[in-house]
Image (spheres, rainbow, N blue to C red):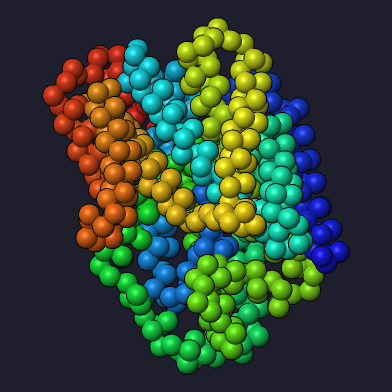
């Protein structure tokens, strides 16, 4: 264990806890805990949304994909950049306005219920269940990634590494809620950004410049320079379709809801898209450069999973231990920034959408904040138990990217069409929203299982049929059932008027 790397990690982790303690003093009610009192500025909101979105795949998965197939990896990046831009352009401002108009909704299930005046509470309960189920497994996959990073870096046992990483994340999320999560995400986003700029620049310089790097990659395999390398039409569509998922990700769109004002959206969009575009280019170039740098000792060597270690290998061979420690902390940042957001959204669903809505309607703000904090502990504990099953020493294994893909598709199909149409179609109804949510979620699950079983003869990302069948279900059931009340229509008009960003 290198002492410099250890010290760097400890300083980083202590800093995250300090932010949690400061945020604790600023959190007095449920709106503070869940949405930070709608007080986020454009910079914090943009980097927090980006950091919680990207997770460890930005520093591990995407460079690994670029290392494995070269420029064929750009399709995923293109899809995500387009989807993120459309999300900022068409959802951010309107959702910020509508959630305030719709009885000051502070969670996604809360917004669904208030938007459609759903007295049955089915929309709230079903959407909250979807959030809790998907995010518990999603959080577990992130904890496994953090444990493996600690294990490989410091030589710890898997379970020790798992508990250390989990305790830090749980602590600052438990204490500070949304403000702690957003500010730590802001710091983590900067760290990830710098890591993905510095690493490829230093690697390219070591190889003798960009032209020399491209020549070296070509000498390994000319196909690495082909954007259609290993790609099929269905493969390109599937990678581009990741962009559809943005409209329904609760841990991302809650950042829009937490902005100070719709006036902050254009600046936040510019910051967020600049951060994301540059970071993703850096991630692809990191993996691409790795093809040349490690040509004499290929990382894959028959094991595709090793390709995702290309960034970690670069930190070892290019930098001194102090800088290496900072870059490895960037990987931990990517993992933590997503897990904390998922924990917070899940605990918010538990406090606001189950406890307050069903068990204690007159619960005080202080009581609800503590229910949310207990929810963080409960959900995290379940996720830790699931993550312990991934201990390699016990023969376990967790395909993190598969879990992320599954959850991303599930949220995108179940919530994305509802979010979009609820913001832009006055004629959408409660029954349409219910039909779309159920259709999207069920289609993702069924399509995935049929693909795995070989019943579907082609490999198409399940979000594609899930998203468009959900859209169809929303339109059909909204047309044939009871139409929106005058109150719902008036509220829609008020939200449109309040949305100043056109």
Name the one closer to the observer, 310 or 285. Answer: 310
Picture coordinates of residue 307, whole percent (x, y):
54, 71
Q: Is residue 477 above or below residue 280?
A: above
Which residue occupies the extreme front position in the image?
394
Question: Total of numbered circles in the picture?
Answer: 0
Name the residue rendered at 35%, 20% in the picture. 122
Find residue 306 and report its image quarter.
bottom right
Give the residue furthest to the right. Answer: 3
**Image x and y of residue 197, in percent:** 61, 68
| Image-based side of 228 in relation to 168, left or right | left
x then y, percent, for residue 383: 58, 40
Classify residue 33 by image quadrant. top right
Residue 397 image position (x, y, % from top left): 54, 56
Residue located 40% across and 41% down the image:
411
Foreground residue, 71 or 380? 380
User: Is 331 placed above or below 471 here?
Assistant: below
Q: Quadrant of the N terminus?
A: bottom right
Q: Nearer the viewer, residue 434 or 491?
A: 434
| Residue 406 horizontal side relative to residue 351, left or right | left
Asked whether 457 or 438 is in front, the reply is: 457
User: Looking at the image, can residue 182 be seen?
Assistant: no
Q: Residue at x 31, y 65 (%)?
A: 236
Residue that protrudes farthest toward the top in the picture: 362
Q: Is residue 132 among the parts visible in the rendering?
A: yes
Task: Give the position of the C terminus as an image quadrant.
Answer: top left
């Amino acid at each position: 264990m290198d002492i410099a790397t250890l010290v760097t990690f400890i300083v980083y982790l202590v800093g995250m806890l300090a932010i949690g303690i400061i945020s604790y003093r600023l959190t007095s009610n449920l709106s503070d805990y869940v949405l930070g009192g709608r007080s986020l500025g454009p910079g914090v909101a943009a980097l927090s949304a980006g950091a919680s979105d990207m997770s460890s795949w930005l520093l591990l998965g995407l460079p690994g994909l670029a290392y494995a197939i070269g420029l064929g990896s750009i399709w995923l990046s293109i899809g995500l950049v387009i989807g993120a831009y459309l999300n900022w352009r068409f959802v951010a401002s309107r959702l910020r306005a509508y959630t305030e108009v719709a009885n000051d909704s502070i969670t996604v299930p809360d917004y669904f219920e208030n938007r459609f005046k759903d007295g049955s509470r089915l929309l709230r309960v079903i959407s909250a269940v979807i959030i809790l189920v998907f995010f518990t497994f999603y959080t577990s996959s992130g904890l496994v990634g953090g444990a493996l990073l600690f294990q490989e870096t410091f030589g710890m046992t898997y379970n020790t590494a798992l508990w250390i990483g989990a305790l830090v994340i749980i602590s600052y999320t438990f204490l500070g809620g949304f403000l702690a999560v957003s500010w730590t995400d802001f710091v983590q986003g900067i760290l990830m950004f710098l890591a993905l700029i510095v690493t490829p620049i230093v690697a390219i310089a070591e190889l003798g410049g960009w032209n020399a790097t491209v020549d070296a990659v070509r000498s390994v395999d000319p196909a690495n320079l082909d954007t259609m390398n290993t790609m099929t039409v269905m493969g390109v569509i599937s990678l581009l379709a990741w962009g559809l998922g943005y409209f329904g990700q609760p841990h991302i769109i809650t950042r829009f809801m937490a902005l100070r004002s719709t006036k902050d959206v254009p600046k936040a969009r510019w910051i967020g898209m600049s951060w994301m575009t540059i970071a993703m280019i850096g991630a692809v170039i990191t993996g691409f450069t790795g093809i040349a740098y490690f040509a004499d000792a290929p990382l894959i060597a028959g094991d595709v999973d090793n390709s995702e270690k290309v960034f970690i290998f670069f930190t070892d061979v290019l930098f001194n231990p102090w800088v290496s420690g900072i870059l490895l902390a960037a990987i931990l940042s990517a993992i933590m920034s997503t897990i904390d957001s998922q924990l917070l959204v899940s605990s918010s669903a538990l406090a606001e959408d189950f406890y307050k809505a069903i068990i204690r309607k007159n619960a005080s703000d202080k009581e609800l904040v503590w229910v949310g904090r207990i929810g963080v502990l409960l959900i995290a504990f379940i996720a830790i138990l699931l993550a312990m099953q991934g201990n390699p020493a016990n023969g376990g294994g967790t395909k993190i990217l598969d879990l992320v893909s599954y959850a991303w598709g599930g949220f995108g199909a179940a919530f994305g069409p509802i979010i979009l149409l609820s913001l832009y179609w006055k004629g959408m109804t409660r029954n349409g929203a219910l039909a779309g949510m159920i259709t999207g979620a069920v289609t993702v699950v069924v399509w995935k299982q049929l693909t795995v079983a070989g019943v579907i003869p082609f490999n198409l990302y399940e979000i594609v049929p899930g998203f468009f069948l959900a859209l169809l279900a929303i339109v059909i059931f909204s047309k044939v059932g009871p139409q929106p009340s005058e109150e719902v229509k008036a509220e829609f008009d008020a939200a449109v008027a309040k949305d100043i960003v056109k």
